Image: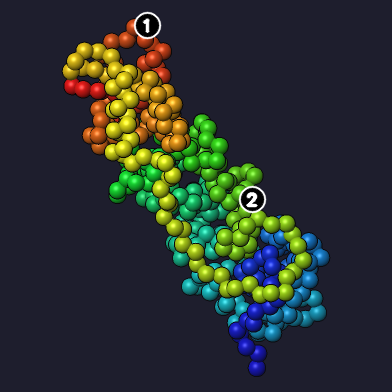
């Protein structure tokens, strides 16, 4: 009697063989009337083309077909494969399904496999359906990449606010106790510019949707943020296995791969050289005192003047201007320092006021108070 327990086949050396075999089984299980080996290879070829040459892939399909047949999960008739009841059940278990396995390859490929790859297979069906749309997949990728918890629908604006909180925590070296919970009181533009510091090449993305799309593409190493490109990148990364580095295609290796294990994302370490809130506020007050104007009891310094001084004196912090300004707002909110707005404006200082402006809720601040 054939066993339903799969034996480990020879590993490719560049792909996670357990995950690849499961994908092969799922593809066959979705075909109620069976599937030819040629069609099987063609349907899954895009997922392995970055690692295997066509001839290697065809050889691997043949080998995995034999392994699945020996395990009693598929039957082979010439070049055609048909799933057994055990094979269909095994595929459903792999996808985290409690009910019947969908017989639509499009649904499985565009939703269920993505959910498995992202660790979302136990999520409600309503949420999983969002993975079939570009915005839904982008949102899921960004939430996974930065550990975001969004209540309700993960709209671009909600994601931007949560990303801004992550960026501000990073600016403080991840040393803010309890986190910021995404309630920063920043304007949409300021929050977007702050969140953009999480990108490899920070810039003004113009809209929240573009920001989310860019971060999603970066997370999976995709050249573009289109739905098909992101989907392919997600599935390829999953088949590469946990923490698999990029590699050029090579011949199958003979040593088996270790069984994959769940890899939890570790907490973000403190940024080297980044200040905590108290240290930041102390340094700001010290430099503001050297640039303060006014009279005793009402001395204050332009935010822009202090920014340029801090950038010169504290290059090891590696802060951008938007990070500095948003850190000021957080320090003001925490009571570690005080900001002030300009009472009177004239043409003599309009440029300094514009450069110093920081929007917080309904207020616009221009100065750092030194005393009073």
Judged left or right of residue 246, residue 126 is left
Quarter of image, res 53: bottom right
N-terminal of the pair, mark 2 or mark 1, is 2
Taking the spot 48% from the left edge, 37% from the top edge, the residue there is 196
For residue 348, the mark is 1
* 304 horizontally vs 140: left or right: left
The correct choice, above or below, for 4 with respect to 193 in the image is below
Where residue 164 sits: x, y (%)? Answer: 41, 39
Q: Position of residue 370 (x, y in %)?
A: 25, 23
Residue 307: which numbered mark, if any? none
Q: Position of residue 119 (x, y in %)?
A: 50, 62
Circles 2, 1 touching at the beta carbon (< 8 Å)? no
Direction top: furthest residue: 347
Element on which disc 1 rests: loop
Packing grade of label 2 (10 A; few <14, some 14-19, many >=20) is few
Q: Is residue 30 visible?
A: no
Residue 256: name its quadrant: bottom right
- The residue identified by callout 2 is 228
* Residue 198 appearing in the image: yes
């Amino acid at each position: 009697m054939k066993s339903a327990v799969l034996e480990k086949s020879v590993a490719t050396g560049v792909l996670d063989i357990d995950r690849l075999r499961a994908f092969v089984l799922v593809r066959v299980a979705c075909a109620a009337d069976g599937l030819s080996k040629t069609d099987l290879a063609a349907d899954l070829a895009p997922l392995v083309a970055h690692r295997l040459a066509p001839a290697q892939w065809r050889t691997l399909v043949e080998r995995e077909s034999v392994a699945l047949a020996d395990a009693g999960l598929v039957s082979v008739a010439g070049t055609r494969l048909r799933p057994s009841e055990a094979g269909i059940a095994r595929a459903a278990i792999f996808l985290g399904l409690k009910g019947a396995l969908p017989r639509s390859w499009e649904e499985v490929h565009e939703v269920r496999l993505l959910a498995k790859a992202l660790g979302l297979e136990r999520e409600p069906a309503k949420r999983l359906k969002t993975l079939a749309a570009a915005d839904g997949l982008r949102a899921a990728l960004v939430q996974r990449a930065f550990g975001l918890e969004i209540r309700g629908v993960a709209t671009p604006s909600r994601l931007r606010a949560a990303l801004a909180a992550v960026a501000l925590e990073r600016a403080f070296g991840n040393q803010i106790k309890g986190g910021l919970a995404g309630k920063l009181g920043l304007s949409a533009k300021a929050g977007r510019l702050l969140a953009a510091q999480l990108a490899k090449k920070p810039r003004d993305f113009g809209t929240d949707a573009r920001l989310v799309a860019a971060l999603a593409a970066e997370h999976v190493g995709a050249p573009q943020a289109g739905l098909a490109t992101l989907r392919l990148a997600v599935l390829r990364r999953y088949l590469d296995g946990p923490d698999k580095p990029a590699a050029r295609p090579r011949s199958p290796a003979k040593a088996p791969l270790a069984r994959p294990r769940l890899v939890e994302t570790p907490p973000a370490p403190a940024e080297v050289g980044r200040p905590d809130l108290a240290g930041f506020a102390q340094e700001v007050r010290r430099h503001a005192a050297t640039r303060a104007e006014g009279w005793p009891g009402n001395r204050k310094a332009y935010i822009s003047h202090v920014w340029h001084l801090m950038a010169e004196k504290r290059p090891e912090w590696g802060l951008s201007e938007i990070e500095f300004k948003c850190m000021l707002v957080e320090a003001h909110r925490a009571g570690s320092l005080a900001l002030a707005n300009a009472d009177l404006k004239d043409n003599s200082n309009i440029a300094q006021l514009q450069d110093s402006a920081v929007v917080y809720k309904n207020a616009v601040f221009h100065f750092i108070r030194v005393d009073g």
